[in-house]
Image (tube, helix red, strand yellow):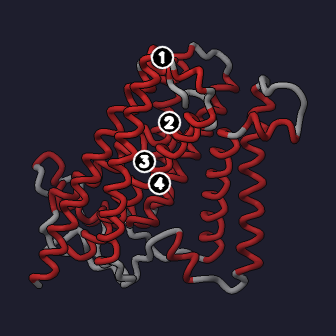
Amino acid sequence: MEHMKENGRASSVVVWASLGAAGVFEAWTVLETQDKTVRAASPWQDDPYDVMVSLAQFAVPMLALVIALRLLVWRAPGGADRVRQTVRAAGAMVTLIGLTVVSEWAAAIARKPASFSGTWTSVLIGGLVVNSVLTVVVAVSLVRGHRRHGSADPWRHDWLGDAVFLCRRIPVLRRGVGPDAAVWVRRRAMTVFVTLSTLAAAALTSAQAIGEGWTDPLLIAWFLIVAATSNLAFCVISNAVAGFVARLPRTRPRRIAEASAVAGCVAISAATAFRDALWPMFGTGSLTSVPALAALTLGAGLVTSLVTAALLLVCFPYGSSGLRRRFGVAATHLRRPDKHR
């Protein structure tokens, strides 16, 4: 028991360190993307690098928020699952930061040396060095923590249960949030993911359209779809990693449909990032037409989704528990996490 407490304390320190690194990264990213003067000097202001930066700018604070909220119930029952899941969520957050840092280094290396003469460019490179060092240090600590808590046993608690636990201690929310609400979300997890992804995408699209003065309905609709699919992929993959919602067992066709949909969402983001490199394979000249842009990116997502579904049907003709574990935490062994005793 004492050993478990020591591991829990060590893991909480690592999680707090990851939150600190995320705070530094987010503050720097907001500066380099929202200040026009700084953004103009940024080596990674254009795609494909900017797609990764934009994703991390919104995903990292969301992960940091839920991790920080879960630390409020760190000592509640279910500590073993909580430690494992929180360390994994912190690992996902740091991985996202690491991929963004790598993308920014790639942009800096690809840029001509003469373009590094500006003051803000030098400052941005200095900030990139700081973020890189912090990310490496925290990542090493998280890997060590994962080795201490690398059990593959089914989770008996999830984040949703902790959310109910917290809400039931707030008088305003006590009546509206209870065990029934948690069960409802678990049964309709994909619907919840799609709804949240679409709402977040609508807010982002509105801000982008107003800020850039967009008037083309097709461009706005395309951006909304790209943002929503990116958010959906993030929700499903991060849930599979950290177990935010313990999903109920699903039929094989539904698991394949969800897996192929997520693959298509990832392909849309990738095609958006590398659209200029992909366009010469299908057309001539520069990619300036919105219909062509939509056809290229959304078509890539559709094709990837169909190919993924076909491969899963061929490779797993009789179903696969591995597929179930990868794209959703089965709730077969889930204890009532909404009632911490």
| SS at circle 4 | helix
- Check whether the beta carbons of the residues at disc 2 and disc 3 lie within 8 A of each other: no
**Which of the 4 image quarters holds residue 285?**
top right
Q: Residue at x 74, y 56 (%)?
A: 304
Q: Residue at x 79, y 24 (%)?
A: 289
Give the residue type at disc 4: Cys
**Which of the 4 image quarters holds residue 155?**
bottom left
**Which of the 4 image quarters holds residue 310?**
bottom right
Q: Residue at x 55, y 31 (%)?
A: 44
Task: Return the residue at label 1.
Answer: 118
**Label 3, label 1: how many angstroms apart (C-alpha)?**
25 Å
Quadrant where the image shows the N terminus: bottom left
Q: Is residue 210 above or below residue 96?
A: above
| Earlier sequence position, callout 4 versus callout 1 | 1
Question: Which one is in front, 294 or 248?
Answer: 294
Task: Return the residue at label 3.
Answer: 97
**Label 2, label 4: how many angstroms apart (C-alpha)?**
16 Å
Question: Which one is in front, 111 or 175?
Answer: 111
Task: Return the residue at label 4.
Answer: 235
| Earlier sequence position, callout 3 versus callout 1 | 3
- Check whether the beta carbons of the residues at disc 3 and disc 4 lie within 8 A of each other: no
